Image: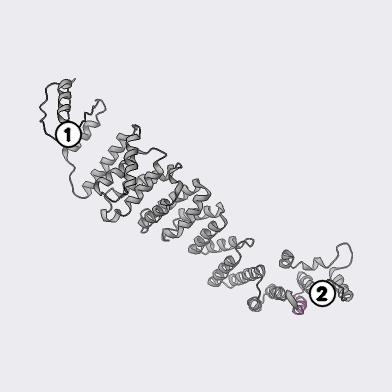
């Protein structure tokens, strides 16, 4: 019924195909046969006659027939009359008729919206066209092609804020990866960098529940797009707050996100920003980094937490500190730990230079010694100074280490 109403084929329910009589003749004869027992009404016949005259391009007769229709089919007859005006190029009359239709039928209202959208496009009234297609999407987003028509229109006329809104809403509503991919395309084109990151959090939460791999990819795309932009810190705050609520973050592998957290951590402490700018961001950033790194046994996130707590005690919860210390004790020795340490030392040196501070020559010398891979290094540590001195005297001979000292002493050149 719906398809026949839209295509103006309702008359096919009234005529017989297995006959040589023309369809208009069959309808005329059917009118003469009507009586009190007939299931077909005169309105049904008039409506069908209007459809046939319309298909034969006899628009005036079609309008005449539809004007005679009464009852429940009146709104559809009015819509068809407007279609007939439009087919004759009578845009003003067509628009007036479309706008006069009163109905609660969502399908009819959507059809009217689409026809008005087409007329506004012909008249080059883009604001009116945008308004009416948005109303159509809001009313009946599942109607065939209505969201695609809206998307194509917004993209063609570079109304990217509306295009982004459409894609986000449809991705959340339909859970279709096609719409999530469309959002990703907009992000890659840097069309979202002026939009508040908070706007996208529901979208990301929905995607996290549907597809972790795509979620991680889209998050890193968003992250890179905001980096260096005015809303970058807003992104870090909003995403970290959102990700902190994701209960499964420590139970899965996150190679892309782990890398992003690491890069951002070093970026934040590189000296580009003042401490007051990052001190509210760093704690939650490191908590999330630590949580998603648990499965990967990442040493760097653990040491970052312990180091930050040394500088700013009390900013991290006791539970996180306890977990970090436990993890530090249980982690196996990593082959790249020296590389990570050197990277951290270099970041500190860069920060010091930017702030006109001098890294001590003694510290630089120690780093140079550790980088001499032709030599083997043995660390001797203990709580008792006397025990360490006694051990060294046995190994390297008589030493002149004072009984009370807190410095780091380096011996070299002995066999």
Asked which secondary structure carries label 1, the reply is loop
Q: Left or right: where does residue 241 sit relative to residue 414?
A: right
Q: Looking at the rendered structure, which numbered label has been put on residue 383?
A: none
Q: Looking at the rendered structure, which numbered label has been put on residue 408?
A: 1
**23 in the magenta segment:** no
Instruction: Give the percent coordinates (x, y) of residue 262.
Output: 36, 44
Instruction: Give the percent coordinates (x, y) of residue 329.
Output: 32, 35
Q: Left or right: where does residue 407 sit relative to residue 376?
A: left
Q: Residue 85: which quarter of the image?
A: bottom right
Decide: is 386 above or below 113.
above
**59 in the magenta segment:** yes
Q: Left or right: where does residue 319 sit relative to residue 84?
A: left
**Label 2 sits on residue:** 41
Badge 1: how crowded within 10 Å, few (<14), some, or many (20+)? Answer: few
Decide: is 399 above or below 258.
above
- Looking at marks 2 and 1 on the same chain, the residue that comes earlier in the sequence is marked by 2
State which region is magenta: 58-67
Name the image quarter holding the C terminus: top left
Residue 390, visible in the rendered structure: yes
Residues at marks 2 and 1, CA–CA distance in whole angstroms:
105 Å
Q: Residue 332: which quarter of the image?
A: top left
Task: Give whichever of 146, 322 is nearer the camera.
Answer: 322
Badge 2: how crowded within 10 Å, few (<14), some, or many (20+)? Answer: some
Asked which secondary structure carries label 2, the reply is loop
- Residue drawn at (22%, 33%), measured in percent from left and top? 368
Instruction: Give the percent coordinates (x, y) of residue 160.
Output: 49, 62
Q: Residue 337: which quarter of the image?
A: top left
């Amino acid at each position: 019924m719906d398809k026949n109403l839209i295509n103006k084929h309702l008359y096919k329910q009234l005529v017989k195909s297995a006959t040589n009589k023309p369809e208009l003749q069959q309808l005329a004869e059917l009118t003469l046969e009507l009586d009190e027992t007939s299931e077909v009404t005169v309105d049904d016949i008039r409506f069908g006659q209007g459809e046939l005259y319309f298909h034969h391009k006899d628009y005036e007769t079609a309008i005449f027939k539809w004007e005679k229709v009464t009852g429940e089919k009146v709104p559809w007859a009015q819509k068809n009359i407007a279609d007939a005006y439009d087919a004759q190029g009578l845009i003003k009359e067509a628009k007036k008729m479309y706008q006069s239709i009163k109905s609660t039928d969502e399908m009819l209202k959507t059809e009217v919206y689409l026809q008005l959208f087409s007329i506004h496009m012909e008249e080059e009234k883009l604001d009116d066209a945008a308004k009416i297609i948005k109303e159509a999407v809001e009313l009946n987003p599942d109607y065939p092609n209505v969201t695609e028509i809206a998307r194509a229109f917004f993209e063609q006329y570079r109304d990217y804020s509306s295009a982004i809104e459409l894609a986000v809403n449809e991705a959340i509503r339909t859970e279709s990866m096609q719409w999530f991919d469309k959002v990703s395309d907009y992000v890659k084109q840097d069309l979202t960098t002026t939009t508040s990151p908070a706007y996208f959090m529901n979208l990301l939460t929905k995607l996290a529940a549907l597809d972790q791999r795509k979620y991680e990819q889209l998050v890193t795309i968003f992250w890179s797009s905001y980096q260096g932009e005015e809303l970058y810190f807003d992104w870090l705050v909003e995403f970290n707050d959102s990700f902190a609520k994701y209960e499964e973050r420590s139970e899965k592998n996150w190679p892309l996100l782990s890398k992003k957290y690491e890069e951002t951590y070093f970026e934040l402490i590189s000296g580009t920003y003042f401490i007051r700018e990052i001190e509210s961001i760093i704690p939650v950033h490191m908590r999330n980094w630590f949580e998603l790194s648990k499965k990967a046994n990442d040493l760097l996130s653990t040491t970052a937490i312990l180091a930050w707590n040394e500088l700013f005690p009390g900013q991290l919860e006791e539970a996180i500190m306890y977990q970090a210390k436990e993890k530090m004790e249980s982690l196996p020795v990593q082959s790249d730990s020296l590389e990570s340490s050197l990277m951290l030392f270099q970041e500190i040196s860069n920060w010091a230079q930017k702030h006109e501070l001098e890294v001590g020559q003694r510290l630089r010398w120690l780093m140079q010694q550790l980088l001499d891979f032709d030599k083997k290094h043995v660390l001797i540590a203990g709580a008792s100074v006397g025990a360490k001195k006694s051990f060294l005297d046995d190994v390297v001979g008589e030493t002149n280490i004072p009984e009370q000292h807190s410095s780091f002493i380096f011996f070299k050149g002995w066999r």
